[in-house]
Image (cartoon, helix red, strand yellow):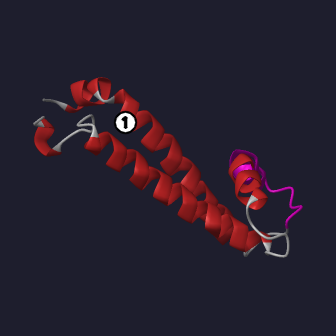
Amino acid sequence: MNIASSLAAYWYFHLPNFILAVLMYTLLGRVLLGLMVDADSPNYIWRFFCRITDPVVTAVAIVTPKVTPPVVIWLFGFVWLFWLRVALHYTLLLFNLAPRLGGAAS
């Protein structure tokens, strides 16, 4: 099985996994960049990171105490997205829908 057919056959796994990974690592980038720039910086990379990750930060902030600093909320978002990816993979493995190593389905 080649890579293209694997991507097409398991799109329901790869697409959400990719989106969650992008959000996860963008949040990590926001944490690292937040150490170097101000919160209201006009830097276009900072604005992009904020625009992409603000929905995740808003969702995490709902269940996080209000006194928590923003950088901790961003890190919590990173951890929550990681566990969401693990849960996605485990759920698809449980129902035998996840791609297997070498493309073998059992």
Look at the image and tell me in which quarter the N terminus lies.
top left
Q: Name the residue at 30% across, 30% down.
A: 10
Provide the secondary structure element on which disc 1 rests. Answer: helix
Give how far across and how far down residue 84 sits, in percent: 49, 52
Dominant SS in magenta = helix
Q: Is residue 89 left or right of residue 65?
A: left
Label 1 CA crowd tier, 10 Å (few <14, some 14–19, many 20+): some
Residue 89 visible? The answer is yes
Q: Which of the 4 image quarters holds residue 35?
A: bottom right
Q: Is residue 13 left or right of residue 83?
A: left
Q: Which residues are magenta?
A: 39-54
| Up-down relation of residue 89 to residue 105 (above or below) | below
Q: Which of the 4 image quarters holds residue 99?
A: top left
Look at the image and tell me in which quarter the C terminus lies.
top left
Give how far across and how far down residue 5 sits, in percent: 23, 24
Judge by depth and name the residue closer to the eye, 94 or 55: 94
Judge by depth and name the residue closer to the eye, 26 or 87: 87
Q: Is residue 46 magenta?
A: yes
- Amino acid type, residue under disc 1 in the picture: Phe
Give how far across and how far down residue 36 sits, in percent: 74, 74
Q: Which of the 4 image quarters holds residue 28?
A: bottom right
| Up-down relation of residue 30 to residue 15 (above or below) | below
Total marks drawn?
1
Q: Name the residue at 16% across, 30% down.
A: 2
Judge by depth and name the residue closer to the eye, 78 or 65: 65
Identify residue for label 1: 13
Judge by depth and name the residue closer to the eye, 58 or 53: 58
Q: Name the residue at 27% across, 44% down.
A: 93
Residue 45 visible? The answer is no
